[in-house]
Amino acid sequence: MPDFSPSPTPNKDEKSLKELPKARFWEAMDIAQWEGYWFEPGLIKPAMTFKSTFNAQNDDVLLASTMKTGTTWLKSLSFCIMQNKTPTTNDDVLTTENPHFHVPTIESMIYSTKPPEIDPYNSSSPRLLHTHLPYAVLPDSIKTSGTKIVYIARNPKDTLISMWHFFNSILKPDLDPFPLEKAVDCFCNGVHQYGPFFEHVLEYWLESQKRPEKILFLKYEDLKRDPKGEVSKIGEFLGRPFGGEEEIEEILERCSLERLKNLEVNKNGSILMNVPNTSYFRKGVVGDWKNYLTVEMVERVNETSRVKLEPSGLFLLDLLYSF
Ligand code: PAP
């Protein structure tokens, strides 16, 4: 892995990092804006290094998502699919480590509590990797090689509620939750980790429309509605079609929220600094936003989504439920 520690004589990138626009997320966390997106500042140097040095190969697979849209599920499913076998109980590696260990998120590896299963910069292909970075800053080698990208998006209201629970538990465990009205505001203005959400999903969506053989664009709600159909689609896309329905059922069971949540390895410890493994697994339902958002909040998020996504043919609102 490249060295991300500050150099004694700051280089151009390090100097320019200091000049990036800054904001305070939820009055609790500093974030900085790079290439139009907001990040916890420690992620920006690894993101720059990834962009400028990563050498993708034709058979690499990159999973991509913004936060809280189903990353952990997609990592688990893709990991099992890429293993290309039906593991017996004894060699089911999902029981040995959290999915984020098996499929590292490239830019946040510096915060790993132990080195992830593979070093993206030094292991040979095919590599199964993940990033939360927007499409625009992906390395050119990923865009121009045969590397396949699988992106997962989610209803913005459920994403927001998932994010609200997550950051409340991480940033404010002993305090009252951050006011939801303000959280809606930050979300719609795009001032949050890996935000703006809407531009993030739109970039991948547009690219997937241009190059469907390169980017598979999934929706969390479709995976919930038709898990077998969607998992079969992932297998086909990755060149690892399933032999039969039982194989798909087995993988779905292996990667189910209930099962993963109750594995010892996910009930304890932390794969990334300050983030308990338990926090990746909550309810995993569609439409939980109804339990939290007021009519005004719903209208604000819906309107943002309608204006920003729907003219491009991307519909993420209430695919299974209506308000
Ligand atoms: P991340 O961005 O921190 O990696 P991510 O995995 O994208 O988080 O999203 C977490 C959401 O996925 C949680 O949703 P919730 O807050 O609405 O409940 C989590 O419960 C859900 N999730 C995690 N694992 C699974 C799974 N195996 N099946 C379905 N949903 C899951």
Image (spheres, helix red, strand yellow):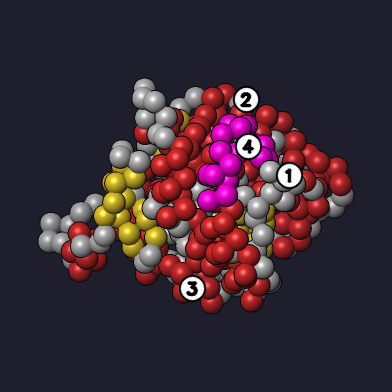
- Ligand 1 closer than 8 Å to the CB at disc 4? no
* Sequence order check, earlier mark of 4 and 3: 3
* Contact? badges 1 and 4 (CB < 8 Å): yes
Secondary structure beneath dot 1 equals loop
x and y percentages locating residue 140 in the rendered image: 46, 74
- Residue bearing the label numbered 4: 290
* Sequence order check, earlier mark of 1 and 2: 2
Q: Is residue 271 magenta?
A: no
- Residue bearing the label numbered 3: 141
Q: Which residues are the magenta region?
A: 282-300
**The residue under label 4 is which amino acid type?**
Lys
Rendered position, 257 above or below 106: above
Q: Would you call the spot at circle 4 few (<14 residues within 10 Å), some (14-19), or many (20 or more)?
A: some
Considering every residue shown, the one lying at the far left of the view is 9
Considering every residue shown, the one lying at the far front of the view is 296
Residue pictured at 43% horizontal, 55% vertical: 190
Disc 1 to disc 3, C-alpha distance: 40 Å
Disc 4 to disc 3, C-alpha distance: 42 Å
Secondary structure beneath dot 2 equals helix
- Residue bearing the label numbered 1: 321
**The residue under label 1 is which amino acid type?**
Tyr
- Image quarter hosting the N terminus: bottom left
x and y percentages locating residue 237 in the rendered image: 72, 63
Residue pictured at 54% horizontal, 51% vertical: 301
* Sequence order check, earlier mark of 2 and 4: 2
Between label 1 and label 2, give the one nearer the viewer. 1
* Sequence order check, earlier mark of 2 and 3: 3
Disc 2 to disc 4, C-alpha distance: 26 Å
- Residue bearing the label numbered 2: 262
Secondary structure beneath dot 3 equals helix
Q: Is residue 42 visible?
A: no
**The residue under label 3 is which amino acid type?**
Ser
